[in-house]
Image: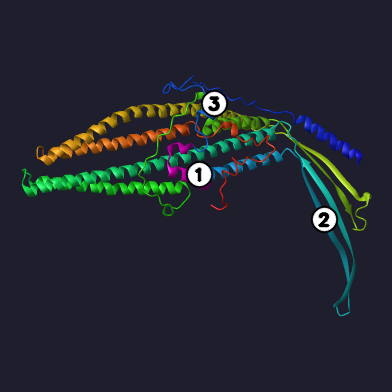
């Protein structure tokens, strides 16, 4: 027994020493040129993410009760988020599967066999009348152990790859949550602005009704020459605006249904009353490009994917080298069964198995080349994601800046158009201008008001896009490291993202 233990210990120590090898390149995050500032926001100053960007419940800056009510449901009930959460949990499990390959496997087996040999006798008539014989019972009880030492770091590279993939999936989960939150906010704003369009259209219908009433009164009284065609023209204008008002209900219903799906509810279960107050335009946060690299979850996901592909190169390189498997078994065997536990019945074995492929016609070389190409692709994707992030922020900032100037110009235009319509309508009632002049003034006023609402909607959507492009309330420092952590994922990763119920 002592000699066996010495041999087994020697093999284990040898395997552990050889297991120190780790093939493949060491991962370093590639550098990406970062501009000193955003060209569209010269007033932006250096600030920490905690002070500069929206955190947590970023939607409260819009001061909309519907957003405050529905946004918390996204992380719990949104089906896209739930799918991303399931993918993340699967990735965490794959890390544990890979880690288990570093350790030996143990087993136990037992057998119990009864054998016998019978004899028979027969009468003179050839009919069997009885049998007798001897029987014996044998048994064995054996424990087994096997281990494939990680000589070239293939398993450790696999753990590294799976851990990086899990972190990428976690960042993807954060990105999916943020994307669905911003999509919900955008859809709610579209619903609110549709309500504003409906209110504007109702006011327009009332104004056209007033113009038609004056036209009919003038035609009946004969105060001014008002031909029947003018009355018909006023009726057609009114009926057109009434039809437009009805048509806005279709868009509103579609937005309401989309909101219900985003929060994981059936469309008929969510009733959203007509709103009379539009969301407020939130203040623009301050920040610098370096904070963007840490905050956006899609950038973190792309960077972790690079790390996973780098580890995959090490796995492919390790295939060049031989594999070694160690096995051991020990137990008791006895036939017959009596006195099975006697030390004299002890049996044991030690074994080692090595394998190396000599000719594979370039297969391993091609696998390494494929892994390196995949890594190069991940690097390009990472750099493109970073550059696209800066592009997105620049677009958001330029949109907010330009639309703010357009909104100021439209405010003046709407004010003048309303005043012009009032003057024209007064002149029409006095009989100094015809109905065509009134209709033209009303049309200009309606067009300017609709454009003003549309511009305000675009400003709100650009504000939402900017929050999303800055990473919302998420930070790359929150990534859970499954390879080195000794505790389960934090509640912010698992419990908050997990569905409240196990069933979909």
Where's residue 103, x and y in %?
Answer: 75, 39
Indicate yes or no whether the magenta region holds residue 69: yes
Q: Is residue 241 left or right of residue 314?
A: left
The Cα atoms of the two marked residues, 1 and 3, are separated by: 26 Å
Q: Is residue 125 left or right of residue 385?
A: right
- Check contact, mark 3 vs mark 2: CB within 8 A: no
Res 373 quadrant in image? top right
Q: Residues within 10 Å of mark 1 (few under 14, many from 20)?
A: few
- Whether residue 361 appears in this view of the structure is no
User: Which residue is label 1 attached to?
Assistant: 72
Count of numbered circles on the image: 3
Color style of the picture: rainbow
Measure how far apart labels 3 and 2 are at the Cα level: 68 Å
The residue carrying mark 2 is 111
Query: In which quadrant of the rendered image does the N terminus lie?
Result: top right
Judged from the image, the secondary structure of the residue bearing numbered disc 3 is: loop
Q: Nearer the viewer, mark 1 or mark 2?
A: 1
Residue 48 is labelled as 3
What residue is rendered at 42% in x and 41% in y?
Answer: 64
Q: Position of residue 451 (x, y in %)?
A: 29, 35
Q: Is residue 95 above or below residue 140?
A: above
The magenta span reads: 58-80
């Amino acid at each position: 027994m002592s000699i066996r233990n010495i041999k087994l210990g020697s093999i284990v120590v040898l395997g552990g020493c050889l297991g120190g090898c780790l093939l493949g390149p060491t991962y370093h995050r590639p550098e990406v040129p970062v501009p000193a500032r955003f060209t569209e926001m010269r007033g932006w100053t250096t600030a920490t993410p905690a002070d500069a960007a929206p955190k947590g419940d970023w939607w409260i800056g819009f001061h909309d009760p519907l957003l405050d009510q529905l946004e918390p449901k996204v992380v719990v009930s949104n089906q896209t988020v739930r799918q991303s959460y399931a993918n993340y949990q699967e990735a965490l499990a794959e890390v544990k599967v890979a880690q288990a390959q570093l350790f030996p496997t143990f087993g136990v087996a037992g057998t119990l066999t009864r054998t016998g040999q019978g004899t028979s006798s027969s009468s003179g008539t050839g009919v069997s009348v009885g049998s007798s014989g001897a029987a014996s019972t044998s048994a064995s009880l054996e424990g087994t152990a096997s281990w494939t030492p990680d000589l070239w770091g293939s398993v450790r590279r696999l753990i590294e790859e799976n851990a990086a993939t899990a972190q990428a999936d976690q960042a993807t989960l954060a990105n999916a949550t943020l994307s669905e939150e911003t999509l919900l906010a955008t859809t709610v704003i579209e619903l609110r602005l549709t309500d504003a369009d409906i209110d504007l259209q109702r006011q327009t219908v009332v104004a056209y009704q007033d113009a038609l009433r004056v036209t009919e009164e003038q035609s009946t009284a004969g105060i001014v020459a008002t031909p029947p065609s003018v009355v018909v023209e006023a009726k057609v204008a009114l009926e057109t605006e009434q039809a437009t008002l009805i048509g806005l209900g279709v868009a509103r219903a579609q937005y309401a249904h989309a909101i219900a799906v985003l929060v994981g509810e059936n469309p008929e279960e969510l009733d959203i009353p007509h709103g009379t107050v539009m969301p407020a335009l939130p203040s623009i946060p301050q920040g610098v490009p370096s904070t963007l690299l840490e905050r956006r979850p899609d950038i973190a996901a792309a960077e972790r994917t690079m790390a996973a592909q780098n580890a995959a190169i090490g796995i492919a390189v390790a295939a060049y080298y031989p594999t070694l498997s160690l096995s051991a078994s020990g137990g008791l065997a006895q036939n017959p069964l009596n006195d099975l536990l006697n030390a004299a019945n002890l049996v044991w074995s030690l074994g080692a198995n090595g394998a190396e492929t000599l000719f594979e016609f370039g297969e391993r070389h091609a696998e390494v080349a494929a892994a390196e190409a995949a890594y190069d692709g991940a690097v390009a994707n990472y750099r493109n994601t970073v550059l696209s992030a800066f592009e997105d922020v620049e677009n958001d900032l330029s949109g907010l800046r330009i639309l703010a100037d357009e909104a100021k110009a439209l405010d003046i235009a709407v004010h003048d158009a309303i005043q012009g319509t009032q003057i024209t309508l007064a002149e029409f009632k006095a009989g100094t201008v015809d109905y065509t002049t009134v209709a033209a003034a009303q049309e200009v006023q309606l067009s300017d008001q609709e454009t003003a609402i549309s511009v305000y909607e675009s400003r709100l959507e650009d504000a939402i896009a900017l929050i999303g492009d800055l990473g919302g309330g998420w930070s790359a420092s929150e990534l859970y490291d499954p390879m080195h952590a000794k505790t389960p994922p934090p509640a912010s990763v698992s419990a908050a993202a997990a569905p409240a119920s196990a069933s979909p």
